[in-house]
Image (cartoon, grey):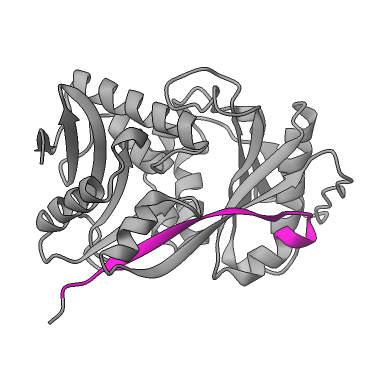
């Protein structure tokens, strides 16, 4: 394979080239080839337990892949970005073979972003099996929007940076105890996102007990496309809001708090002049999907996870 480098830490030049490649692919495809989690790790140079695959041709970076081997239960996972003009079957499959070869056992999970992702085609051709679907749903903010109604013992406020950080991380872990990708977030993960240009305190809502002030849930919204920063997607589409994360104390599930928090965030996004809102939800989370459908969301696209296992 022409010019393949595998490194655990990226230098400044490598980071810049990888970010530029991902931005160019996003502009061409209309969506990013990697998740926000991977993109943030990339911009910070990676970590000690990840590998970065840099594929060059004639001194030009044409491919990037991130391999995370930290999950000892589910196994290694990769995400791949390959320049459109170099997406031949041979290049894609050879890169995946190199990634498989770098895993401890040869087992590998891979995200393919978008229903028609070329990565999904490579995965299926190489015998990967489909194991998970993450739905993207969208809703018009111009359509009628119910009011957010909270019970009398709950009050709504915005997040207080520097004061709420630890309690929010604990609440997030509690709310997503069975969803490690979200529930395992650390203070550092929170702060990385707070340092992003899109972070906005007025769009980060916290529900708390009116008497004890204990955090009961939250809705963190996000706006894509308002700032022209690397990876911001500002050049790809008009500004669009996102239901970024909604979390509720499991002991309060089914009492309408999640719905009220979601609606509070949607009203905020509408007040920002946005006409569309999106969210991501696991296809197996039928209760959340029913809630979002009842609030006017419909399926837009999907990210698919595949698994490759070595036969025993």
Residue 158 occupies quadrant: top right
Tell which of 104 and 180 is nearer to you. Answer: 104
* Residue drawn at x 17%, y 30% as measured from the top left: 56
State whether residue 129 is above or below residue 223. below
Q: Position of residue 267 (x, y in %)?
A: 79, 39
Q: Is residue 139 visible?
A: yes
Whether residue 305 is in magenta: the answer is yes
Whether residue 211 is in magenta: the answer is no
Residue 13 occupies quadrant: top left
Magenta region, residue range? 292-310
State whether residue 185 is above or below residue 306. above
Q: Position of residue 230 (x, y in %)?
A: 42, 21
State whether residue 69 is above or below residue 272. below
Q: Quadrant of the N terminus?
A: top left
Q: Is residue 22 left or right of residue 205?
A: left
* Residue drawn at x 28%, y 45% as measured from the top left: 88
Q: Is residue 125 left or right of residue 24?
A: left
* Residue drawn at x 30%, y 64% as measured from the top left: 125
State whether residue 62 is above or below residue 107. above
Q: Position of residue 80 (x, y in %)?
A: 30, 45
Tell which of 33 and 266 is nearer to you. Answer: 33
Q: Please identify the residue farthest to the bottom as the structure is shown.
A: 312
Q: Quadrant of the C terminus?
A: bottom left
Q: Is residue 151 left or right of residue 91?
A: right
Q: Is residue 184 visible?
A: no
Q: Is residue 70 left or right of residue 33?
A: left
């Amino acid at each position: 394979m022409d010019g393949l480098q595998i490194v655990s830490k990226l230098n400044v030049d490598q980071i810049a080239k990888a970010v530029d490649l991902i931005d160019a692919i996003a502009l061409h495809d209309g969506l990013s080839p990697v998740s926000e989690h991977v993109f943030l790790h990339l911009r910070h140079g990676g970590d000690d337990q990840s590998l970065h695959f840099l594929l060059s041709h004639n001194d030009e970076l044409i491919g990037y892949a991130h391999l995370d081997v930290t999950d000892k239960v589910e196994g290694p996972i990769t995400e791949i970005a390959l320049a459109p003009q170099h997406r031949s079957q041979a290049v894609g499959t050879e890169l995946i073979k190199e990634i498989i070869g770098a895993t401890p056992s040869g087992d590998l999970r891979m995200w393919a972003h978008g229903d028609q992702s070329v990565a999904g085609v490579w995965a299926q051709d190489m015998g990967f099996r489909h194991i998970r679907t993450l739905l993207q749903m969208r809703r018009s903010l111009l359509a009628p929007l119910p009011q957010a109604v909270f019970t009398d013992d709950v009050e709504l406020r915005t997040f207080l940076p520097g004061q709420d950080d630890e309690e929010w991380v604990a609440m997030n872990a509690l709310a997503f105890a069975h969803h490690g990708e979200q529930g395992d977030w650390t203070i550092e993960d929170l702060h990385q996102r707070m340092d992003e240009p899109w972070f906005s305190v007025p769009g980060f809502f916290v529900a708390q007990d009116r008497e004890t002030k204990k955090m009961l849930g939250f809705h963190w919204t996000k706006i894509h496309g308002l700032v022209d920063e690397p990876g911001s997607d500002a050049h790809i589409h008009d500004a669009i809001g996102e239901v970024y994360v909604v979390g509720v104390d499991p002991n309060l599930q089914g009492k309408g708090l999640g719905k009220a928090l979601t609606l509070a965030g949607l009203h905020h996004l509408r007040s920002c002049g946005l006409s569309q809102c999106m969210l991501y939800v696991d296809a197996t989370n039928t209760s959340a999907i029913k809630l979002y459908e009842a609030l006017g969301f419909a399926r837009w696209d999907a990210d698919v996870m595949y698994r490759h296992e070595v036969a025993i």
